[in-house]
Image: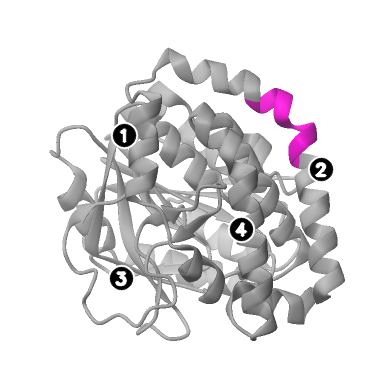
Amino acid sequence: MPTPSVSVIVVNYDRNELLAACLRSLEAQTYADFEAIVVDNGSTDSSHETLAAAETKGVLVIRNPENRGFCAANNQGLAVARGRWVALLNNDAEAEPQWLAELLAAADGRQGCGMAASKILSWEDPSVIDKVGHLIYPDGQNRGRGTGETDRGQYDATQEALWPDGCAALYRREMLEQIGGFDEDFFAYADDAELGLRARIAGWSCVYAPKAVVRHHVGSTLGRYSELRLFLIERNRVWLATKLFPAGMVLRAPFYFGLRLAATAWAALRGRGEGARATHTVGAYGLLKCVIRANWAALRGTPAMLRKRREIENFRKLSPAETAALLRLYRIRLSELTSRAS
């Protein structure tokens, strides 16, 4: 069997209709030299019907008896992937026909490029940007670049990005073999940021491909403001900083966390930003309890992250000072992070 240039991994959990649409978008790709791998995380809905039909078309399906999380499932896909490049596509996303071709055109042959980011638009309103690469705040909270903006062509130039969003991303296999796959302790959320920053520290770059367009049902997996999703986002941003930030930035992160909390609360009181929407969904007390639980869980996991931090030195190319400069270059403004909803 010929080796494909690209392996596309789709992780699925209980979203049969979205999965079917996602796979149809892969069938419509103009670039044909790829294999598709679906990892199902113990779905209990009718996903098995779509998976069975996909297998008859040559899709490799891995079935887990339980939900192992986004990170572990992607690592399962990586373990069997044969392509020189590995693309990720969320089951709640639909790729336009040129998606794979444009990602490869931007990344393949670009020296030192290990990642490519897609132009991800809202499925509900494709004039609204979901994300075009990522930005980060000094407490470890990352956010999609351009999130919530109207797409007026302001992100239509091929350019360097910090790292891609895991909803629709391309990774060089050589890079993944060097630095490893996803950190399974993260389970889901901020995992793409952790992998992307780890890759940047190893000296790899990321390119943004504006013509590689995907439409995304935002937050459909766990619910946009579910307590579990909020918990994972908050816990994992602490782990990301602990594991990968330069020491000085780790020490300053609690200060910036306090600033972000205060700014989020102020924005929520005015009915603005993610804080307002989350408070409306889970309540102010529920949100506070979630933040406390997440930070306590992050603290308990700190020894493991510190052990992993030492392992980064095995492939580090960027010095701590260079890493700090990179994070400053792609720092998100506090007002944008707290006042604009995704």
Q: Compare marks 1 and 4 and give the one earlier in the sequence.
A: 1
Q: Compare marks 4 and 3 and give the one earlier in the sequence.
A: 3
- State the separation of the CA atoms marked 4 and 3: 39 Å
- State the separation of the CA atoms marked 3 and 1: 27 Å
Left/right placement of residue 322 relative to residue 332 reads left
Question: Which image quarter: residue 205?
Answer: top left
Magenta segment's dominant SS is helix
Q: Which mark is residue 296?
A: 2
Locate residue 299, reporting x and y percent.
76, 36
What residue sits right under mark 1 in the picture? 1
Q: Secondary structure at mark 3?
A: loop
- State the separation of the CA atoms marked 2 and 4: 19 Å
What residue sits right under mark 3 in the picture? 96
Residue 304 covered by magenta stretch? yes
* Tag in front: 1 or 2: 2
* Mark 4 neighbour class, 10 Å CA radius: few under 14, some 14 to 19, many 20 or more: some
* Mark 1 neighbour class, 10 Å CA radius: few under 14, some 14 to 19, many 20 or more: few
Q: Compare marks 2 and 4 and give the one earlier in the sequence.
A: 4
Q: Residue at x 33, y 41 (%)?
A: 326
* Residue type at the position of mark 1: Met
Q: Secondary structure at mark 2?
A: helix
Q: Residue at x 16, y 64 (%)?
A: 157
Magenta residues (range): 298-305
* Residue type at the position of mark 3: Glu
Where the N terminus falls, by quadrant? Answer: top left
